[in-house]
Image (cartoon, grey):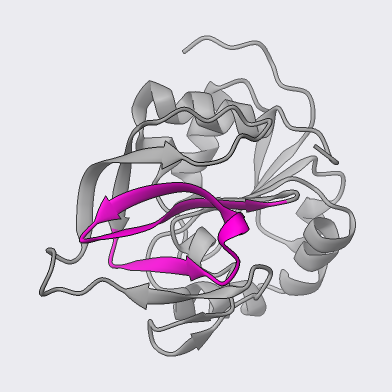
Amino acid sequence: MKCEKIPGKVAIIDYKAGNAPSVLHAANKVGANAILAKTANDFEDATHIILPGVGSARATMQSLAEMGFMAELENAVLHKKVPFLGICIGMQVLFEHSEESDTNCLGWLKGNVVKFDSKIERVPQMGWNKVVFTKKTPVGAIDDYYYYVNSYYVKPADITDTWGITEYGVTFTAAACRGNIHAMQFHVEKSGETGLKLLRGFLSLKAGE
């Protein structure tokens, strides 16, 4: 995928439980100037911030706290309104609470994270599943199949935060957005050309869009 360069600085949070190098590779592939953010200072002048994720909600929250990211991350996202993207666990920790290890999360979006019923479907969900985007945003997302590895899913308190839906035993929120905050349960960096187009659409956003 050959792309024109995207202006700005993309800070990809490199924490213990994440898969930041894979997201870094994808961001650079679509033309971004991306770095791995290893300290809070790396958020300085960032035009976009991405929180990737694999593993558990508790490990993610502990890593963010131990690395001293919390204050500067909240300042950038909640006050400066820097466009933010959470991927997989990076989406789940945006909400208030996760059933996974009874974990209190960031609470930037209202709602909770619950586990799939293993009596209905195999857990975890692994593989490709279709997302239907239910509201339009400047990102320009398209309905297609995206790649998942998840045992839990989010239940937003406010349905208007749902950006896209999919089905796996139940219909659930596959993508969420409110203002400058965007999130995807699927791995956009592992979802082929469609995923890369979606990532580029997010990275092309400007603050305030």
Residue in the foreground of this view, choosing between 29 and 96:
96
Residue 79: percent from the left, percent from the top?
89, 61
Residue 72: percent from the left, percent from the top?
81, 66
206 in magenta = no
Tally the marks: 0
Answer with the quarter of the image where residue 41 lies.
bottom right
Say which residue appears at 78% left-offset and 23% top-offset: 7
Q: Residue furthest bottom?
A: 102
Say which residue appears at 79% left-offset and 53% top-offset: 43
Identify whether 139 is placed above or below 126. Answer: above
Residue in the foreground of this view, choosing between 82 and 38:
82
Answer with the quarter of the image where residue 125 lies.
bottom left
Asked if residue 184 can be seen in this view, the reply is: no
Residue 171: percent from the left, percent from the top?
32, 57
Quadrant that contains the C terminus:
top right
For the record, the magenta segment spans: 150-178
162 in magenta = yes
Q: Is residue 92 left or right of residue 165?
A: right
Residue in the foreground of this view, choosing between 38 and 27:
27
Say which residue appears at 66% left-offset and 72% top-offset: 67
Identify whether 75 is placed above or below 163. Answer: below
The kind of secondary structure the magenta stretch mainly shows is: strand
Residue in the foreground of this view, choosing between 11 and 203:
203
Asked if residue 59 can be seen in this view, the reply is: yes
Identify whether 21 is placed above or below 26. Answer: below
Q: Is residue 44 left or right of residue 122?
A: right
Residue 21: percent from the left, percent from the top?
48, 44
